[in-house]
Each structure stands twice: as C-alpha cells, then as structure tokens.
Image (tube, rainbow, N blue to C red):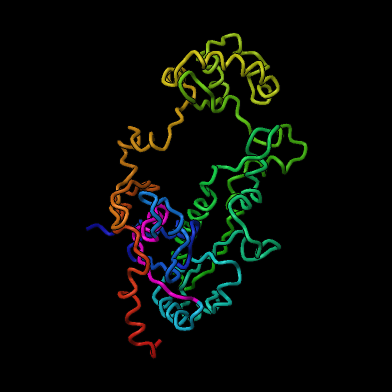
Amino acid sequence: MTNSALTHLKVLDLSWHIAGPYCTKILADYGAEVIKVERPETGDPSRAAGPFKNNEENLNASGLFAYLNNNKQSITLDLKSEQSIRIIKQLVKGMDLLVENFAPGVMKRLGLDYETLKAINPKLVMVSISNFGQQGEFAHYKATEIITQAMSGFLSSVGEPHREPVRAAGQLRILEYITGTFAASSALAACRAARVSGIGAHLDISIAEMGLLQRSYPTVQNSYPTSVFKYEGRYVMLPGIEQCKDGHVGISVLTGQHWQGFCFMIEAYDWVEDERFTTLPQRLIHKDIFQERLDAFLMEHTTEEVLALGNEWRVPVTLVPTFEDLLSLDQYVEREFFVEVNHSELGIMKQPGAPFRMSKTPWSIRTSAPLLGEHNEKTLKAFYDKSTQI
C-alpha cells in the first residue's frame, strides 16, 4: 500500500469543537497518526451536536463528530487529574505536534504550557487556537462565531446596506473551518522546520484574525480615506442572486467584457454603453431601473434557460442547488468528491472528500471516527500498568 503524505507525523490532539479538530482532520486524512484526547463520559462537545441518525441522540453517532474525526484514535483523560497530566507529558515525548484550543492560560494552569512541554520534547510543535489569540485586551473574552465574525469585519460588510448586518454563511461556523485549514498548513511548515533544525515552535492562531485575512479588499480600501472606491459600507453585487420563473440563479458581472455579454444575454442592447449601468457603483445608483428590467427578463425564463444563455454569452451564471442536489450533481459525481464512510453506529453516510488531490500520496479515509475512548486500552494500558514509571 502506498504511504500517505504524512504517514510519519505523530499528533496529540487536545482540541475540541471545530477549529482544532478540523486542523487535525486534515492531517489525519493525509496519513498522520492522531491521538485525540477527550473528556471521560461526555467527550468532544461536537459529539452532542448531531445530526443524529433517526434524530436519536448518541455520543457515538454524531454526524459532525464523524466528519471531523475520521482516521483518529480516541482516548479519554481527565485533565484535572495529576495522573492524566503525567500521561500527557509521557505521550508528548513521542509526538511531532500538539494541537489545543483551550482559552489562553488553561494549558499553563494544567502544567502543559509550551515552555514545560518543550523541555520534555525540544522538537515539539504546539498549535494554540483561540478566539482572539494568546495576548491582547480580548484574549480572555468568551466568544462564539457571531462575535469573531463581527470582530473580523464580516458582519459590517455583509447584507443589504439599508438593513441590519447579516451573519456570513448562517450557522456553518465558516471561520472555524478557515482557521483549521490555516492551522494545519502552518503546523506542517513548523514541523518541517523542526525536523531540519531540531527546534520546535509555538504557533498562536486567532480565529478573528483568520477572518480578517479574508478581508484584504476592505482592509486596503479603508487604508486610503480618500479612496473613490468606497461603497455603502457593505459589498453588494448587482446583479447577484436573482429570481427566475422556476427558481434562483446567481449572476456575476465583473468586467467590461462580462457587461457586454450580460446585455446581449438579457436583450438589453441599448445598455451596452449606457453609463448608468456599465459599472457597479452606477448600477447601485440606478438599481431600481436596472432591477425592474432584469426581473422582467428573468421571470420569462427558467433557470436552465438562463444558465444556457450565460454559457452562450460567457457570463458567469450559476444554478443555486440545494445540498440534496449537490450530492448527485454530475460535476461532483464525475470527480468522486463526496465519499461514503461506513461508521459502526451511523452506518454508511456521505461526507465531503479530499480538499486537494495528490497523485502519489493520496487522501484517504482509513478508519471511521472513533467511539468515545475506543483506544484507551491500546494507548493507555501500558501507562496504568506501569504507573510508577510515568
């Protein structure tokens, strides 16, 4: 069997919820050995989040946990116990990477701060994920995604200008997945450096700052107070998501070439050089006139007809499929993006597949997400049998 890309990487995962587990999921799915430490009896809170098969709550059958924790081993330790802390320190000796997302200061109070752990394993890379980072006025504030979105500029820049701000991506906790991706890539860079130099590192990753990284356009835009490109405070596309005869389509008009094609597509030939509509700021000023004519055209056509016209005139147009539609969409079926995972409690379920394709050392699901404490005997038996040596 071909080795995976990260076969020799050993990871101790003290994280929970989404950001940290998504980081270690990426590593595990490319071959890393990940030992996940969970609370006894309750485990990772995502075990209680569902969705559950037949809506029956089961800590070993959460769809969210199952997605985030394929290819990992689960052990349970009470980190308030001195014995458990000794076990963690013993495990750290054989690890390349430790990932945690406790509130700043918790690891130090547990006696597991980076300074302590690097004395045990100088090559250890430790990733600390938190809402606002390890320092600063907000470091110890409690936060949920709506707070980190607000503090990264998402809320102030999403939604219609005349209405209240809108939470980006609903309740999908998009910033946590973004953070997990950045955490995985930065951890790999640090592990590579540690293998060369023999010296590990402590990575401080802020969820709010990862959100700000996605906001480069308004950051630069607002660096220049006199910029002529300041819009109404929120980014608005016109057209955007639009109603057709039988559903919705997304239309994006970004360049002069797109604008000409768009005018031909909706048979508005007199608009091709009409300065009221050729740029987005002008379309926003005259949006009532623009929208009325566009609506009249779209309500005479189906989504499939609009999609075909967009392809004909090379205008970016898309359907707006539901998740149920996406699971059987030809594009994703042909690329085998969605994968089936057979879980002992959930049965066969579909999950998103590889985030990127590697030809020689591919992504794979080797084992489904573990049951709570499934690997206690395998991993911890030796420690408890020889506890005096810990």
Q: Given the current orientation, which residue lies at the most extreme bottom position?
A: 388
Residue 287 placement (x, y as % from top left): 66, 21
Picture residue at 66% right of the left edge, 51% below the top = 151
Q: Nearer the viewer, residue 273 or 45?
A: 45
Q: Is residue 65 magenta?
A: yes
For the image shown, how many numbered marks are present on the structure?
A: 0
Q: Given the current orientation, which residue lies at the most extreme left position?
A: 1
Measured along the vertical axis of the image, is residue 3 above or below residue 76?
above
Measured along the vertical axis of the image, is residue 339 above or below residue 84?
above
Q: Nearer the viewer, residue 363 or 71?
A: 71
Q: Is residue 303 magenta?
A: no
Quarter of the image where one finds residue 87: bottom left
Can see residue 290? Answer: yes
| Segment tinted magenta in the rendering | 59-79
Picture residue at 38% right of the left edge, 89% below the top = 389
Picture residue at 58% right of the left edge, 52% below the top = 145
Q: Nearer the viewer, residue 39 or 130?
A: 39
Residue 354 placement (x, y as % from top left): 36, 48
Residue 119 placement (x, y as % from top left): 50, 81
